[in-house]
Amino acid sequence: MNELAAQANQQSRDIDARIREFFEQVNGVLSWVPVGFEHLVSPIQRGMSALADLAREFWERVRLLWDQPGDSERLKQVGEKWVSEVGNVLGDIAGTLGLDKLRTTAEWEGRASRAYRDAIPAQVAGLNSIKDVANQVRTSLAGLANAIDSFWLAIKLAFTVFLVGAVGAIALACTIVGIPAAIGALTTVVSVSLGLIVTAVMTMESHTNTVEMEQAAIRQKVHDLGTTWSTPDGSAISDASAADGDPSDWQPGS
């Protein structure tokens, strides 16, 4: 699991413990109500019931977070491999194919040599196009990885708000008079935390849609490359024989 997701998961366990502690605290106080405060019990029970419903909504949303936590480090690793094992390798190969670096173009003349020189730039362009694709893949995956990390940082913030508020609510709920205020405070905290989670999810969905469009553009570029990167005409550069009745297409350079 993503490290930030794992930290958030531990926070969610702490939240569960604080919620249980709050309910136990309130039930403990309500188990002994001082004379003259009986009229406060019913409003407290209604408030606790509403709080329990809100807590269930919170947990239903939180449980969905663990289904696809993502792995930002793995995405970054894969992106770097695209560059180091594909883009850089092909870029180096393209660099060796420059006409000024090939002995063939310097030492040979003739129709085949001209065809060879004409074919090389297209092959260099094709290799560099793949290098560009590799760089785009890394950029896209790195963007998704950063979005995942930002998402879990937002979730951790939501959980931190919850935990801080829960501690304060537990402190308030030590008396029958303080319980209504504690319920109100914790209800507000749960609502705020839930709102932060919903916002984080919506933001992550927006990032995901952007990445999907980037990946679609990359796939289209690869498809287009397959149709525009032509295979050299081997017949134009393959006739080096002078014994087949016609002159060789390769002539030594002067």
Image: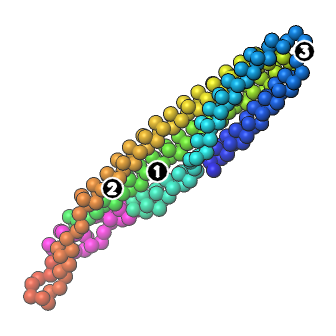
Binning the other alpha carbons within 10 Å of mark 1 as few (below 14), some (14 to 19) or many (20 upward) gives: many
Disc 2 or 1, which lies upstream in sequence? Answer: 1
Mark 2, mark 3: which one is toward the viewer? 3
Q: Which residues are magenta?
A: 92-116
Whether residue 173 is visible here, answered yes or no, is: yes
Q: Which mark is residue 138?
A: 1
- The mark total stands at 3
Alpha carbon separation for disc pair 3 and 1: 67 Å
Q: Main secondary structure of the magenta part?
A: helix
Q: Which residue is mark 2?
A: 222
The secondary element bearing badge 1 is classed as helix
The residue at the point 67 percent across, 30 percent down is 55
**Percent coordinates x, y for residue 168 in the rendering:** 78, 23
Which part of the image, by quadrant, shows the C terminus? bottom left
Q: Would you place residue 112 above or below residue 76 in this image?
A: below
Disc 3 or 1, which lies upstream in sequence? Answer: 3
The residue at the point 22 percent across, 68 percent down is 232
The residue at the point 67 percent across, 24 percent down is 50
As drawn, the residue found furthest toward the bottom would be: 243
Q: Is residue 105 magenta?
A: yes
